[in-house]
Amino acid sequence: MEALEAILTRRSTRKYKDEVPSKELLEKVIEAGRYAPSGSNSQKTHCIVFTDRKMLDELAEIVKGEFAKMELDEDAYISLKNSVNASKKGTYVFHYGAPVFIVVANKKDYGNAMADSACALENMMIAANALDLGSCWINQLHWLDSSEAVRKAMYAHGLGEDETITGGLIVGYPAEGLPNRKQTERTGNPITWL
């Protein structure tokens, strides 16, 4: 798949087959993230890759419990509201049942932590699309980065104490076969030419 096509046809996937993609495919996705630009070429983005269903289920229970404790005001971000409400009902699984979850972290006091991580996540999503894998950006662990329970679990899986969770990515084979690549009309993201 040509690069521009991979970018323009990338869509989020939220339903997956149980099958874990081969390590070779996952390494290609992760390598794309490792080659993303970073401030002053600092290369501080850290990926923690979960492929073990038991670990994913345990992490999902921690996330559900932490969201269930939250009280939000009416101005809260809609996705955060949805996560909290579903967790209180006991029905929430933040990773949509995907077989692979890549947690992205960066140094806490590094000014480009979020920008560098966002570039890495975008590269991985484009690579996944080019490799016929589905993917979806996941923010829930970023929102819960200050949660003692989440940090304790992530320390046990390789997060450094000097790191902040900047995002996540689920990856796998889409339930419907190939990823949805239907281009959608852009109605936002305005452009001003000068």
Image (cartoon, rainbow, N blue to C red):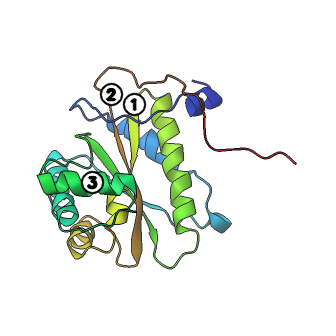
Location of mark 1 (residue): 133
Q: Is residue 161 visible?
A: yes
Residue 165 lies, in percent from the top left, at 39, 66
Looking at marks 1 and 2 on the same chain, the residue that comes earlier in the sequence is marked by 1
Location of mark 2 (residue): 174
Q: In this image, 161 relative to 43: left or right?
A: left
Location of mark 3 (residue): 83
> Which numbered disc, 1 or 2, marks the residue closer to the eye?
2
The residue depicted at 34 percent of the width and 70 percent of the height is 145
- Residue 94 lies, with reference to residue 132, above or below; the image says below
Q: In this image, 166 relative to 63: left or right?
A: right
How far apart are the alpha carbons under marks 3 and 1?
25 Å
Q: Label 3 sits on what residue type?
A: Ser
The residue depicted at 33 percent of the width and 39 percent of the height is 23
> Which numbered disc, 2 or 3, marks the residue closer to the eye?
3
Q: Are marks 1 and 2 in contact (CB under 8 Å)?
A: yes
